[in-house]
Image (cartoon, rainbow, N blue to C red):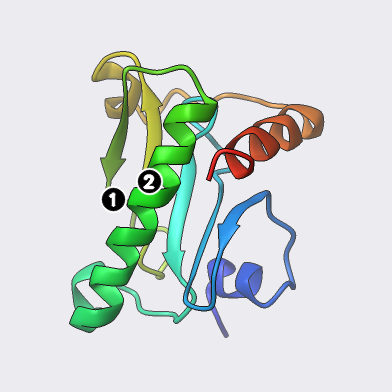
Amino acid sequence: MGSIFTKIVAGEIPAYKVAEDENFLAFLDIFPVAKGHTLVIPKKEVDYLFDLDNELYAGLQLFAKKVASGLKNAIPCKKVGVLVLGLEVPHAHIHLIPMQDESDVLNFSKKLSLSEAEFEEIRDKISNNI
């Protein structure tokens, strides 16, 4: 049984996709800590980021950089924070979080509740800036 992210890649579960290529996918976190909070994953299911082979790891980082650039252009913020954390989904992933200060990325207990329309608007803004 694949992870929830593998099911998103396969189209079995919907997601607010902001960018995609043959190896990687970026989509909005449905439990965001900030508007625009995006997850970047390899399509290949590998549990631990540092278990990715070097080529896939480097590609993921470059894809995340491209998404972060679009995210910063779409969502007003000082910087886009980058975090690798989370044990709940056994699929390597990077969190990209628009931030005004460090507390925006350090408090994962503070989750936003966004409507479908808000998710769609944020997705479109980011997608159009990549």
Marks 2/1 in contact by CB < 8 Å: the verdict is: yes
* Side of 9 where 120 appears, left or right: right
Name the disc covering residue 85, or none: 1
SS at circle 2: strand
Position of residue 38 measured from the top left corner of the image (x, y, whole percent): 49, 43
Tell me the crowding category of disc 1: few under 14, some 14 to 19, or many 20 or more residues within 10 angstroms, Cα based.
few
Q: Is residue 46 in view? A: yes
The residue drawn where x is 67% and y is 78% is 10
Q: CA distance from mark 2 to mark 1?
A: 8 Å
Check disc 2 and report the residue beneath it.
Answer: 95
Q: Of residues 52 and 88, which is closer to you in this image?
A: 52
Q: Describe the element under mark 1 as helix, strand or loop.
A: loop
For image coordinates 34% across by 74% down, the residue present is 47
At a point 31% along the width and 70% down the height, the residue shown is 59
Which of the labelled discs sits on residue 58, or is there none?
none
Residue 52: x percent and y percent? 25, 79
